[in-house]
Image (spheres, helix red, strand yellow):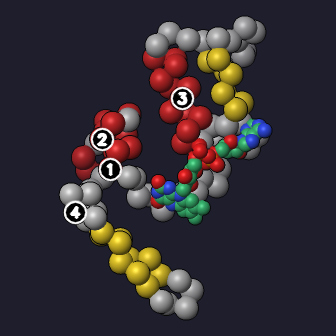
C-alpha cells in the first residue's frame, strides 16, 4: 500500500527518477515514485552504454564486473551507413 504521506514524490521511474528516489530513500526519506508506464522497465531508451561519470559515481559502480566492460570508442552508423567514430582520451 502506498505511503499516505511521503516526504518526496518522484514523477518518472527511469534513470533520473530512479536514481533520485534511491538516493532519497537511502537518506531516510519516505519516497513515492509515480510512473505512467505499466512497467517502469518498459521501453527504456538505452543501448547499454553508460557514461564514465555514471559508471563510477552512482550505484552502477556496484554492478558485477562480469556484466560491464570498458569501451574506449564508439562508432555510430546512420541508416545510410555513413559513420562517425567517437573517442576521448581517458574517457
Ligand atoms: C534510442 C536511444 C538510445 C539511447 N542510448 C543511451 C545509452 O546507451 N546510454 C545513455 O546514457 N543514454 C542513452 N540514451 C539517452 C537516455 O535514454 C536518456 O538520457 C535517459 O532516458 C534520460 O533519463 P530520464 O530519467 O531523465 O528521462 P526518461 O528516460 O525520459 O524518463 C522519464 C520517465 O518519466 C515518466 N513520466 C513522464 N511523464 C510522466 C507523468 N506525467 N507521470 C508519470 N510518469 C511520467 C516516463 O514514462 C519515463 O519513464 C538513449 C536514448 C535513446 C532514444
Callout 4–callout 1 Cβ contact below 8 Å: no
Which residue ends up furthest to the front in the rendered image? 89
Foreground pick, 86 / 14: 86
Callout 4–callout 3 Cβ contact below 8 Å: no
Residue found 41% across the figure and 58% down from its top: 49
Residue found 35% across the figure and 72% down from its top: 86
> How many residues crowd mark 3 within 10 Å: few (<14), some (14–19), many (20+)?
some
Is the residue at mark 4 in contact range of ligand 1, meaning its CB lies under 8 Å from it? no
> Mark 3 = which residue?
20
Name the element at disc 2. helix
> On the rendered image, what quadrant is the C terminus found in?
bottom left
Circle number at residue 89: 4
Q: Which mark is first along the chain, 4 or 2? A: 2
Foreground pick, 91 / 26: 91
Circle number at residue 61: none
Marks 4 and 3, Cα distance to the nearest angstrom?
A: 30 Å
Marks 1 and 2, Cα distance to the nearest angstrom?
A: 6 Å
> Mark 1 = which residue?
52
Q: Which mark is first along the chain, 3 or 4? A: 3
Quadrant hosting residue 53: top left
Residue found 64% across the figure and 41% down from its top: 40
Asked whether, in this view, residue 91 is left or right of residue 28, the answer is: left
Residue found 55% across the figure and 34% down from its top: 18
Q: Which mark is first along the chain, 3 or 2? A: 3
Foreground pick, 68 / 7: 7
Name the element at disc 4. loop
> Mark 2 = which residue?
56
Q: Which mark is first along the chain, 3 or 1? A: 3
Amino acid at each position: 500500500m502506498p505511503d499516505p504521506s511521503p516526504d518526496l514524490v518522484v514523477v518518472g521511474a527511469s534513470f533520473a527518477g530512479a536514481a533520485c528516489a534511491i538516493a532519497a530513500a537511502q537518506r531516510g526519506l519516505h519516497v513515492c515514485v509515480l510512473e505512467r508506464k505499466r512497467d517502469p522497465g518498459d521501453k527504456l531508451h538505452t543501448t547499454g552504454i553508460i557514461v564514465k561519470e555514471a559508471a563510477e559515481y552512482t550505484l552502477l559502480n556496484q554492478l558485477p564486473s562480469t556484466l560491464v566492460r570498458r569501451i574506449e570508442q564508439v562508432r555510430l552508423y546512420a541508416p545510410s551507413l555513413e559513420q562517425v567514430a567517437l573517442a576521448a582520451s581517458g574517457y
